[in-house]
Amino acid sequence: MMESYFSPSFSWIGACFLRRIRQLIPAGFKDELKNLSMLALPASLTQLLVMTVGCVSAAFCGHLGRVELDAVALATATYGAHNLLRVGVILQRAIIVLILTCFPCWALLINTESILLLLGQEPEVARLSQLYVKIFMPALPASFMYDLQSRYLQNQGIIWPQVITGFVANLINALMNYIVLFAFNMGVVGSALANNVSRFSMAGILYAYILWKGLHKVTWGGWSKDCLEDWGSFFYLALPSMVMMCAEWWTFEIAIFLAGLISEVELGAQSIIYELTNCAYMFPLGFSVAGCVRVGHTLGAGKSHLAKLSTKLTIFFSVCLVVIIGSFRHHIASLFTSDDVFLQVAGGGIIRGMGKQKVGALCTILGYYGVCLPVGVPLMFSAKLGIKGTPRGSNEVCRVVTRTKGP
């Protein structure tokens, strides 16, 4: 009797509640959620697979030259506006720039030992690092080209070929490392050679896949002299984008150098933390890539309302990652850094998609070199916290940069 009396009332209240919830959900939410998820999940897996290959490398040379991010906003907006052949011209321009970028990177790598000794590192560590990077040097263009091809496909919403090639390259990498380290006992030289083979395999397999499936036909009209023009707009996005990425990663590299000044044990521990942090970083980076692509496409197509929706969804997914991984923070060694790093990474992708690289670069420089290092270095040495010092400085900078970049 009581149940039958209250059921209509409860049903009416429930219907009103559901109707109100539907009104709060913006138009296009379901489609945009699907589009963002289909980009973000394979992009995260791709980044993780690439990072797995990089874990074999020395931390010193693992992240040099991330210049391929320079044209992301330009290419995504161009593709979103359906200027398809222009995407191919931008790709050609990026290839030339990356080839030229190899020369200053090689100049730096050749002088690795001298630089490390100048920074007070152990002579044997400096010698082995020099040996490793000299062997790794030929793979630098291959590494650049793989990342460039990957961004080229991502800007078109094509993700899964990178996942497949990354998986195959990891199998090759594991096999090569087993052969050179255990069968031939080649040590550091063998590890560098295996990394070389893996990098060339990644670039070659992805290139072959693109040709096989004809993924380039829509946007590639052949080499054009137009790629030698309009470099100003390219570098207008390239340099701030490079600063956004490099300024952040260089802070972690500096932390490794500083750990080497304490002891070899601290250096080894910091290197492990660095690689584990990178692996955790790949998940928000996937959403960052997806957010950058979606915001660029929608702005290029003149759909600003969808760009705003993509921004909100990217931040929402990042918050979910904070909650999930933060719940297991005591079991994951990589979370010596702040959970805010996930929001900061996602915000960086949105900034790039909007073409506001200068804003992102300024926030990153002020945060990492105005807050992180001034806080972290005294904690390492004066407060005798060792390698725990720089992550605490990183905690503060992630909060600062997240709040500054936030939409």
Image: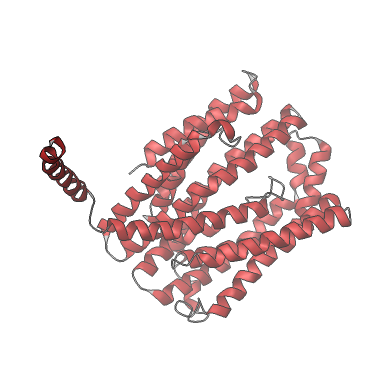
Classify 32 as above or below 348. below
| Residue at 51%, 48% in the rendered image | 283
Classify 248 as above or below 42. above
| Structure colour scheme | secondary structure
Q: Position of residue 384 (x, y in %)?
A: 65, 19
Classify 179 as above or below 281. below
Residue 366 can be seen in this image:
no
Name the quarter where the N terminus is drawn: top left
> Residue most toward the right?
184
Residue 28 can be seen in this image:
yes
Relative side of 337 to 381, left or right: left
Classify 156 as above or below 306. below
Relative side of 212 to 262, left or right: left
| Viewer-side residue, 224 vs 248 | 248
> Residue most toward the top?
383
| Residue at 56%, 35% in the rendered image | 335
Relative side of 73 to 185, left or right: left
> Residue most toward the front?
1
| Residue at 49%, 50% in the rendered image | 285
Name the quarter where the C terminus is drawn: top left
| Viewer-side residue, 206 vs 125 | 206
Q: Position of residue 337 (x, y in %)?
A: 54, 33
Quadrant position of residue 6: top left
| Viewer-side residue, 172 vs 55 | 172
Quadrant position of residue 402: top left
Q: Position of residue 49 (x, y in %)?
A: 61, 56
| Viewer-side residue, 356 vs 394 | 394
